[in-house]
Image (spheres, helix red, strand yellow):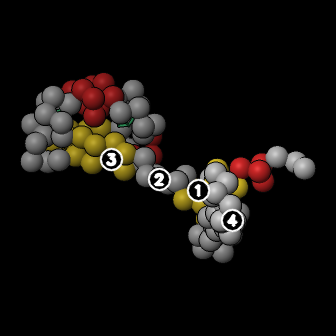
Amino acid sequence: MAVGIPPLELRVDRERCNGCAICAQVCPTQVIDVLDRKAVFSRREKCMGCQLCEVECPVFAIQVRRPILKVVSAEGAVPQVKPQVEPQVEPRRTGEPLIRGKPLSSYFRE
Ligand code: SF4
Ligand code: SF4
């Protein structure tokens, strides 16, 4: 079973972007260019996900997101994981208090 790290999702809202180039100036790995007054992620493979561009953009035009990790088996299928459920205990009608569904006395050794 292998765990793959999905690529970062980098988005620019071109409607909001005003081409100020602040994002390109703050990016430590020169991922961003400004072409025709719009930011473009030209070198996505160099992005390290620091989110500086997102934080510094004055018009909130950038989104940097890391997708949720998925566990994938060698065959590519996501393995089924059975949820851990506590075994059902038939409630006794003794008036004994139940703790998490079990009679209180079941937590103590005889
Ligand atoms: S900082 Fe924001 S508005 Fe300025 S170029 Fe980058 S995305 Fe566009
Ligand atoms: S998240 Fe960081 S490394 Fe990636 S483009 Fe933005 S500033 Fe550059």
Q: Earlier in the sequence, mark 4 or mark 2?
A: 2
Q: Quote the CA–CA distance across marks 3 and 2.
A: 14 Å
Q: Residues within 10 Å of mark 2 (few under 14, many from 20)?
A: few
Q: Residues within 10 Å of mark 4 (few under 14, many from 20)?
A: few
Tell me what residue is drawn at x 90 percent, y 50 percent: 110
Residue type at mark 1: give it. Answer: Gly
Q: Residues within 10 Å of mark 3 (few under 14, many from 20)?
A: some
Q: Quote the CA–CA distance across marks 3 and 1.
A: 18 Å
Asked where in the image residue 95 lies, by quadrant, the reply is: bottom right
Q: Check contact, mark 3 vs mark 2: CB within 8 A.
A: no
Q: Quote the CA–CA distance across marks 1 and 4.
A: 48 Å
Circle 3 sits in a helix, a strand or a loop, which is it?
A: strand
Residue type at mark 3: give it. Answer: Leu
Direction from residue 25 to residue 100 in the image, left or right: right
Residue 27 higher or lower than 13, as above or below: above
Query: Where does label 2 land, which residue?
Result: 68
Q: Earlier in the sequence, mark 4 or mark 3?
A: 3
Query: Where does label 4 land, which residue?
Result: 92
Q: Quote the CA–CA distance across marks 4 and 2.
A: 44 Å
Q: Quote the CA–CA distance across marks 4 and 3.
A: 57 Å
Residue 69 higher or lower than 22, as above or below: below
Circle 1 sits in a helix, a strand or a loop, which is it?
A: strand
Q: Nearer the viewer, mark 4 or mark 2?
A: 4
Tell me what residue is drawn at x 88 percent, y 48 percent: 109
Query: Where does label 1 land, which residue?
Result: 4
Whether residue 100 is visible to the viewer of this picture, yes or no, is yes
Q: Nearer the viewer, mark 1 or mark 4?
A: 4
Residue 74 higher or lower than 10, as above or below: below
